[in-house]
Image (cartoon, rainbow, N blue to C red):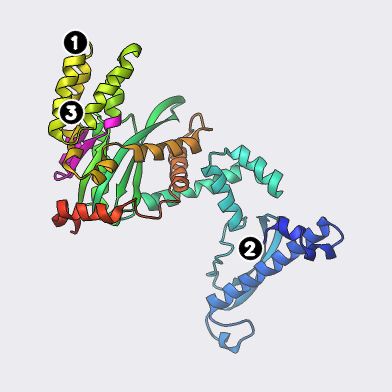
Amino acid sequence: MISKEELLNSDFAKQFKNGEELDGFLKELFVRGTEQILNAELDSHLGYDKHSKRGNNSGNSRNGTNKKRLKSEFGDIDINVPRDRNSSFDPQILPKRSCMRTGVEKLIISLYAKGMSNSDIEQQLIELYDIPLSTSTISRVTDRVKEDVMEWQNRPLEEVYTVVWMDAIVFKVRENSRIVNKAIYIAVGLTTTGHKEVLGLWLGKNETSAFWMTVLTDMQARGVKDILITCTDNLNGFTTTIQNIFPKSQTQICVVHQIRNACKYVSYKDRKAFTSDMKEIYTAPNQEAACYALDKFEEIWGSQYQYAIDSWRNNWTELTTFFEFPLEIRKIIYTTNLIENLNGKIRKYTKTKMSFPTDDAVTKSVYLAINEATKKWTRPIHNWSKIFGQFMILFGDRMVI
């Protein structure tokens, strides 16, 4: 569709004396076009055209028009909206109780999703589109997203997911006149067709295994019967929680999280050599070689940093799950980088908000940020045909329920 700016610079615009005259023509064209569409919608609703004899004794008929003031890219305009005697006509192009064009609503929601505040959106609409909207009106528009969130959060899920990555991201939210930390729990699943899908978002207190049980139970209630592999951080009790809900699932603790935790208290002067030696563990070709590398690692660093070695040994089973799989599967399960990248994009879109006034506000913002961040999730992951074959060999009886 040609933009207003392109139209202003076209040969068509030269027949008008100035931009104001062209704006007036476009505004009139918009009004006429909208009213024609509204009348066509009413024809479809009634089942017969205006003045048609088919309308006689049909039980419903036209009943004049109502004038409605509409906010659009042409400013405030008056539209004659046709009505029927039964008051059952609800036009799609201009729904009841709506005072603005759908395109304007989508623009507001898009700007909000990209992290702009209500006052910033108000200023942007005035400066670029000459559309005067109050912050309260903008807030009401974005509040309608709550219905979308509810529908999305309760949608049915697939019966089987090959991999599910789980992580939480913390935001500051106002509660009882105080600013507190709250966690948004996020789960991303890999379907049997190789597509990534955000399974939901859940708001709770700081990340705990107990709340993750609520998340997993919700996923189960929405239709998930089996998860082949779960990828998590090393939150205490997380693996037990998963096995309580999905007992057949194999859990892989994120190796990158383990490296960070092991290095947390290592002296700066030792860190380079320490991480280099630790790399031998998780880059080993198999679990036996990894176990040998851990023993050597302990010989070198055990006297200084025994807690780091203990953290590997205490979580060894879950840290080395990826060794049981072919290299292609190992690459996608040994870390939670996929969901951490998603969290980074969510942070990007919400970084302008130092804190959120309500739980609904943070949920709405994260939902919109997820929509923006996942727009390109339209294709299967790289090399899926080969990975799918490997999953079929390893889990053939569980891939289809």
Question: Is 199 on the left or on the right of 373, as rendered?
Answer: left
Q: Residue at x 56, y 67 (%)?
A: 91
Q: Are marks 1 and 2 in contact (CB under 8 Å)?
A: no
Whole-angstrom CA distance, mark 1 to mark 2, is 70 Å
Three-letter code for the amino acid on which mark 1 is drawn? Ser
Position of residue 332 measured from the top left corner of the image (x, y, whole percent): 29, 43
The residue at which mark 3 appears reads as 315
Using the image as rendered, state which of residue 11 and residue 110 is in the foreground. 11
Q: Residue at x 51, y 29 (%)?
A: 354
Question: Is 230 on the left or on the right of 168, as rendered?
Answer: left
The residue mark sitting in front, 1 or 3, is 1
Label 2: which secondary element:
loop
Find residue 1 and name its label.
2
Which of the 4 image quarters holds residue 100? bottom right
The residue at which mark 1 appears reads as 303
Q: Is residue 243 shown in magenta? A: yes
Question: Is 37 on the left or on the right of 298, as rendered?
Answer: right
Label 1: which secondary element:
loop
Position of residue 47 measured from the top left corner of the image (x, y, whole percent): 53, 81
**Reading the chain from its start, which is encountered first: label 1 or label 2?**
2
Q: Residues within 10 Å of mark 2 (few under 14, many from 20)?
A: few
Which quarter of the rendering shows the N terminus?
Answer: bottom right
Position of residue 230 measured from the top left corner of the image (x, y, whole percent): 23, 42
Q: Residues within 10 Å of mark 1 (few under 14, many from 20)?
A: few
Which portion, as a residue range, is magenta? 238-256
Three-letter code for the amino acid on which mark 3 is drawn? Asn
Q: Are marks 2 and 3 in contact (CB under 8 Å)?
A: no
